[in-house]
Image (cartoon, grey):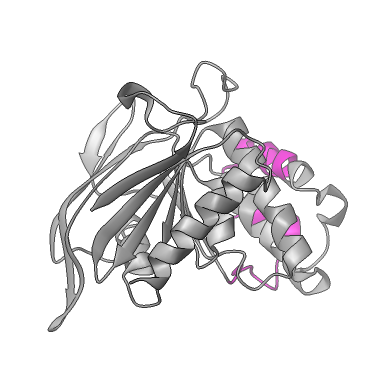
Amino acid sequence: MTDLSIGRHVSEERSISQQPDPTDINPNAVVGAEILIEQLHKFYGEVKVLEDLDLHIQPGEFLAIVGRSGCGKSTLLRLIADLEQPSYGEIKFKSARHIREGITSDDIRVMFQDPRLLPWRSIEQNVQLGLAKEQQANASALLEKVGLKEKAGLWPSQLSGGQRQRTALARALSHKPRILLLDEPLGALDALTRLDMQNLIEKLWTEQGFTAILVTHDVSEAVQLADRIILLDKGHIAQQFKVDLPRPRKKDYTFTELEQQVLNAVLAT
């Protein structure tokens, strides 16, 4: 496995740059969980999807996973989300309060390409889904943050694709997860809406401090959002790229150089 970096030099002690500093985060915000993946294997019959995979994700890190279709990206995300079980190996989660194996709904939320909103509930009701009454004010505040306060009483069918994904993001974050998993959530959006959503996700990640893991086929999106990019190939981590660029990011020469470097690595698999 190759480990590459571009941009300003950083020390080993702070190899993941531009993460939210827990001391700078709003005291009411969530602190992301640390994820430890050890010797992870996933087989479907005779097909090896993930094999002997080791990965350490820092609390509050924004990690992007890229690679060709069928390389195991979404499978890895589903294993972290506890939607599937590993054939063998371990996934552990650590925070300031506990360390354990397994995942509960209190710690993690997944945002898919399909927003998966309930069509018979209003936008506000979708965001409030599963929340206790005393937590529902947080849902209303998030609708304002994602720019949908005036749309709260509408039905999902009355929103654009981008607005539905904003609703899905607000719903995911209303539970104050320690980990947010993003399984190509912006893939179906037009280019301008996609850029707006990238900026919104980055803004809320910075404010709330959760650990974010993004699966994407868009290399530019990975460089735009991530602290670190991993390239999967045939169920293994083929390369890692540290993204040592200041936020908010500009598509300057250094950005473009790293984007091309990651793209060339993907095309070489």
14 lies left or right of 260: left
Name of the residue lying farthest toward the bottom: 46
Tell me the residue at 68%/43% (across/down). Answer: 250
Residue 134 located within the stretch drawn in magenta? yes
Tell me, yes or no, if residue 83 can be seen here: no
Q: Position of residue 71 (x, y in %)?
A: 32, 72
Q: Position of residue 217 (x, y in %)?
A: 50, 68
Q: Position of residue 159 (x, y in %)?
A: 80, 68
**Res 208 quadrant in image:** top right
Residue numbers of the magenta segment = 114-142
Frontmost residue, 234 versus 20: 234
**Res 173 quadrant in image:** top right
Residue 41 located within the stretch drawn in magenta? no
Frontmost residue, 73 versus 122: 73
Task: State whether residue 36 is above or below residue 232.
Answer: above
134 lies left or right of 229: right
